Image (tube, rainbow, N blue to C red):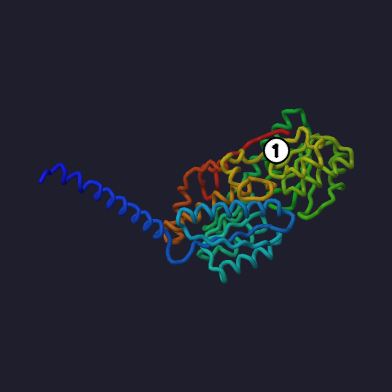
Amino acid sequence: MDTTKKTNYWLPIGIVVVLVLVVVSLAFLQKSRVNASDIKIGVITDLTGPAAYWGESTRVGAEIAKKELEAEGYKVSLTFEDYQLDAAKALTAAQKLVNVDNVDAIYAEFNPAAISVGSFLKDKNTLLIYDAAPTSPLKENNNAYKTYLDYQVGCKEIAQRLKNQGVVTIGVLKGNWEPGELCLAGVKEVFSDKTISEAYNLGDTDFRTQVLKLKNAGVGAIINTAFEGDTLNSLKAMQELQFKVSYGTVDDTITDNVKSKYPNELKGTWTFGFRDVENSFVQKIEKESSKKLATNYAAALAYTHIKQLVKYLDECKKDIVCTKNKLDGAKSDNTIGFNKFVNRIADLEMSIKQY
């Protein structure tokens, strides 16, 4: 028999067999990525309170991450808890997620949740990534990781821009929370004793008394870094008191709502914030959400970190020490400019802009 013909006869069969084996192997690998149980992530954010504009965006980003992970063969369960910026509600939500839902990790947002949830989880075998400015939860909880902007650095940067413009004395509307203290510290690095601070409680809506004091003190600019509502209230008070000075804040408070209501007051405003979200992710948001999000930043952060948590928990078979080692060596991600974790704090690209 002609050996060439024999070889040619078996060659197609061999190729088919190899292809079948490859397909079966890939399917097996995909199915074997996770254990019998899902990777369960709890998300504690504000969905109906003063920061709901951010929380709703977070939900969209988390859902996009879930869909993509499931398409890759991971099993993912997301449980959302709305705590309306109430620390007590955040604690209750965390207790439910751990004791009832048996989540493997929690993604929590804003100062009240970062502190109360971080404290509750300090002796639990549950990972936490919190999206907020405070760094204090890291000292109490070795299983906690921080993401979001550095308020002290950001406020220092915009204070320097304002000083370069000729501002001699600066006013700070300081919310009574850790990020407010961090911002004030950054401003004082630039203006020292030429910094005048007026405090308010989160949830306050009338800033006229504080702004009037700053006006009478002759400040040449005002900085306030908190939420969308705080920027709205700051600009409203400045407008009503006919106090036209430069304003500084964190960029994610400058929503379309703020732009439409106070376009004149916003002129010349300095902000610090994230670098622009990657265009390909913006397209994913537009496909996922029926309406335009108030901020793409929240969606991008949740998307980035939830994907990290699920993949690393899966690779480590939910072992927390192994997962932490993976997070410590996490690769960069261009979605929102994540570089790496440094001492459990996300190194994120920052941008300074003027409106």
- One can see residue 126 in this view: no
Q: Dividing the picture into quarters, in which one does residue 283 lie?
A: top right
Q: Residue at x 48, y 64 (%)?
A: 38
- Amino acid carrying mark 1 in the image: Thr
Q: How many callouts does the rendering have?
A: 1
Residue 346 image point, x, y percent: 55, 47
Question: Where does the C terminus fall, quadrant-wise?
Answer: top right
**Residue at the bottom extreme, as displayed:** 100
- One can see residue 328 in this view: yes
Q: Residue at x 58, y 46 (%)?
A: 284
Q: Is residue 65 above or below residue 265?
A: below
Q: Which residue is mark 1?
A: 271
Depth check: 107 or 159 in front?
A: 107
Q: Is residue 92 above or below residue 202?
A: below
Depth check: 350 or 1 in front?
A: 1
Residue 91 image point, x, y percent: 64, 65
Q: Is residue 199 above or below residue 167?
A: below
Q: Dividing the picture into quarters, in which one does residue 36 lie?
A: bottom left
Residue 319 image point, x, y percent: 44, 61
Q: Residue at x 66, y 63 (%)?
A: 90
Crowding around mark 1 (Cα neighbors within 10 Å: few <14, some 14 to 19, many 20+) is many
**Residue at the left extreme, as displayed:** 1
Q: Dividing the picture into quarters, in which one does residue 221 lie?
A: top right
Residue 154 image point, x, y percent: 66, 40
